[in-house]
Amino acid sequence: MSEKIFVDWDADTTANWGREIVQIGHRLHESPLFTDEALARLIETYPREHYDLHTMTVAESGHHAESWREGDLGSSSGEEVLGAIKNGNIWLNLRKVMLVSEPHRALLEQIFSEVEGNVPGLRTFKHNFGILMSSPTAQVFYHSDIPGQSLWQIRGRKRVFVYPTEAPFITPEAIEKIILNEADEQDMVYEPWFDDKAKVVDLEAGQMLHWPLNGPHRVVNLDCFNISVTTEHWSPEIRASYACHYANGILRRHGMTNLSHQTSGPVFLAKAALATLYKYSGIQKQRKYERFVDFTVDPRAPGGFADIPKRLRSEF
């Protein structure tokens, strides 16, 4: 973009970045990259390995994470897919867009150039860019992400619940299981009363939300078609936290308790070495999920999709 992406970054945003929940204005929703025509073209050429398609119970029915199902775009055109999403109950995530589209890669670079320019001493890497297109009734269940996360609203409105980064909302053991691939991000324990302690934000087009590392959150669309962007990043601090949790998970599985979460000093350096050894030597055999697909997009069907016989995702 020729103009700056952030429109109202101030001293408080700088001070709170990565420490508190930050809500700030942006200009991504003005970009021609997010028109229906541009998105339809992107969908039609998108690599199968880089998208996730899901349906779930509708937002007003409550929290039912077990209803999360995976689907396939099938032979539908990009225009048909968008129509099914607008009128159905579907959530589509185009992941790693920066690997597929040069204009999106350039936009991602500009985003983090501005972030680093506004936060003295911040250094980020392993940037990621995703585009979410979701139905008026769609929701994303309670979960936590490992990298730094931001959610950018492009079109529509969604309600975001962000929870404290402490027990019982999240525990070191829960993060360790996600990192060690023993649990999915949405396998976390959720109780309805958690909402009483959440920061609730109704995100409008032209607004971005960033929360502290590993902050549990869930998202509910507010009865309208939604287009959003997610960005992820790593930093030396995030990498150190990851290494500490990874090593603690290994040590916990060997009977150790009362594990430190410090990310500096001799003990941490030993843990970082342990994490590296296990991760890259093959000592730690990580669980591999078998992901199944049981529906395909059908703009003429209720919900915008039709059931198909269950098959491994790798078969599509």
Image (spheres, rainbow, N blue to C red):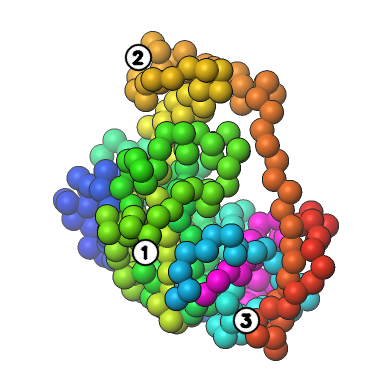
- Looking at the image, residue 281 sits to the left or right of residue 85; the answer is right
Say which residue label 3 marks: 303
Of 130 and 138, nearer the camera is: 138
Q: Quadrant of the C terminus?
A: bottom right
Element at label 3? helix
**Magenta segment boundaries in residue numbering:** 40-58
Q: Which mark is residue 160?
A: 1
Element at label 1? strand
Q: Quadrant of the N terminus?
A: bottom left
Determine the image quadrant of residue 45. bottom right
> Magenta stretch containing residue 57, yes or no?
yes
Give the residue drawn at x 16%, y 51%. Answer: 11
Say which residue label 2 marks: 265
Inter-mark Cα distance, 1 to 2: 37 Å
As drawn, 173 above or below 117: above
Inter-mark Cα distance, 1 to 3: 23 Å
Q: Position of residue 48 (x, y in %)?
A: 72, 60
Inter-mark Cα distance, 3 to 2: 54 Å
- Of labels 1 and 3, earlier in sequence is 1
- Looking at the image, residue 281 sits to the left or right of residue 29; the answer is right
- Of labels 1 and 2, earlier in sequence is 1
- The residue carrying pointer 3 sits among few (fewer than 14), some (14 to 19) or many (20 or more) residues within 10 Å by Cα, namely many
Which three-letter amino acid code belongs to the residue tagged 1? Val
Q: Position of residue 98 (x, y in %)?
A: 57, 55
Determine the image quadrant of residue 73. bottom right
Give the residue drawn at x 27%, y 55%. Answer: 197
Give the residue drawn at x 73%, y 49%. Answer: 290
Of 181 and 18, nearer the camera is: 181
Q: Position of residue 79 (x, y in %)?
A: 65, 83
Q: Are marks 1 and 3 in contact (CB under 8 Å)?
A: no
Count of numbered tags: 3
